[in-house]
Amino acid sequence: MPIPSRAAARPHRPAALGLLIVVATVLTACGQPASPTPQTTPVASGTPLPTPSPSPTPGPTPAFTNTPDPELAGLIPTSVLGHTVVIPAVTEFGLTPGDIGQIFGEIGDRFRALQVAFVESPRLSLYAVQMDAPFATTADLEPYLAAAGQYVGIAGLHREPWQLSAIGDHLAWVRPGDNATLPGTMIYAWATDGYVFLMIGINDPQNLAMLAVLPGAPPPTPTPLPSESAPPSIASSPAGSGG
């Protein structure tokens, strides 16, 4: 009996390759993992969705531009006791509400218009500010009095010399100057109805005349203040001192 050839036990090469390709394709298809199905979390019926927290209301920011305010400028008289009051246009001075507002803390952040005025002789300087609500009162100015004094030329940062005084029908903070200011210097700070005023002058009658024509809050009643009239330092200042 003839011995079969080894080649007879093997399929022809092309057929074997085809078979291997088919088997490999089937195995690959069977072994490929299925695409993952997106997971969803059911929301119970009637369950409210979380409400986002409201953003806090931004606070006021200082205003470093000064828009002309005819109403504010109109509060200032053009003369006092026969002396000319210079009221320059806002383009003629470099200060802004934010500049002076820095000495008044969070109150100053609400300053929106600034008008300055001055008398050359006897010397008097006035800073008038209009602010956004909520409006400051004269009492609210107390924490900033020392800085206000320094702003107008007082050397020492001290609160003590300021007195809350009833001057005519105005309630105002008042203090004398120091050894770095001209003799007779007095400083005033007060607030009313959306306005804040800071004034420094060397002549008592002129100071009081200017204060009287500007807006002001009356002293509280019926409880009197410790000082029902101008502080003694005002009364004792030389009435005719000039600058």
Image: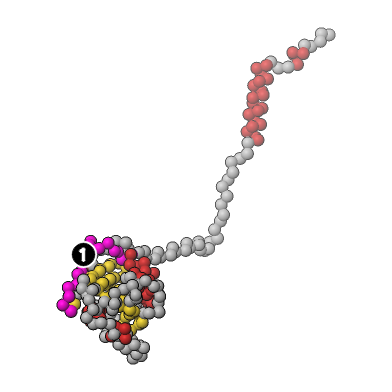
Task: Residue at 23% x, 71% y: name it.
Answer: 118
Is residue 21 positioned above or below 47 on the image? above
Task: Residue at 29% x, 85% y: name it.
Answer: 236
Decide if residue 126 is in sight here: yes
Tell me where residue 74 appears, x and y as whole percent: 20, 72
Residue flagged by tag 1: what amino acid is it? Ala
Decide if residue 188 is in sight here: no
Which one is in front, 88 or 206? Answer: 206
Q: Quadrant of residue 20?
A: top right
Tell me where residue 234 appears, x and y as whole percent: 29, 83
| Outermost residue to the left | 82
Magenta residues, dominant SS class:
loop
Task: Residue at 18% x, 79% y: name it.
Answer: 81
Is residue 85 part of the magenta span, yes or no?
A: yes
Tell me where residue 67 appears, x and y as whole percent: 25, 63
Query: Which range of residues does the magenta coloring cover?
Result: 81-98
Q: How is the image coloured?
A: secondary structure
| Outermost residue to the right | 1
What is the crowding at mark 1: few (fewer than 14 residues within 10 Å), some, or many (at least 20)?
Answer: some
Task: Residue at 38% x, 77% y: name it.
Answer: 142
Label 1 sits on residue = 89
> Which quadrant is the N terminus positioned in?
top right
Which one is in front, 188 or 23? Answer: 188
Q: Quadrant of residue 207?
A: bottom left
Helix, strand or loop under label 1: loop
Is residue 163 part of the magenta span, yes or no?
A: no
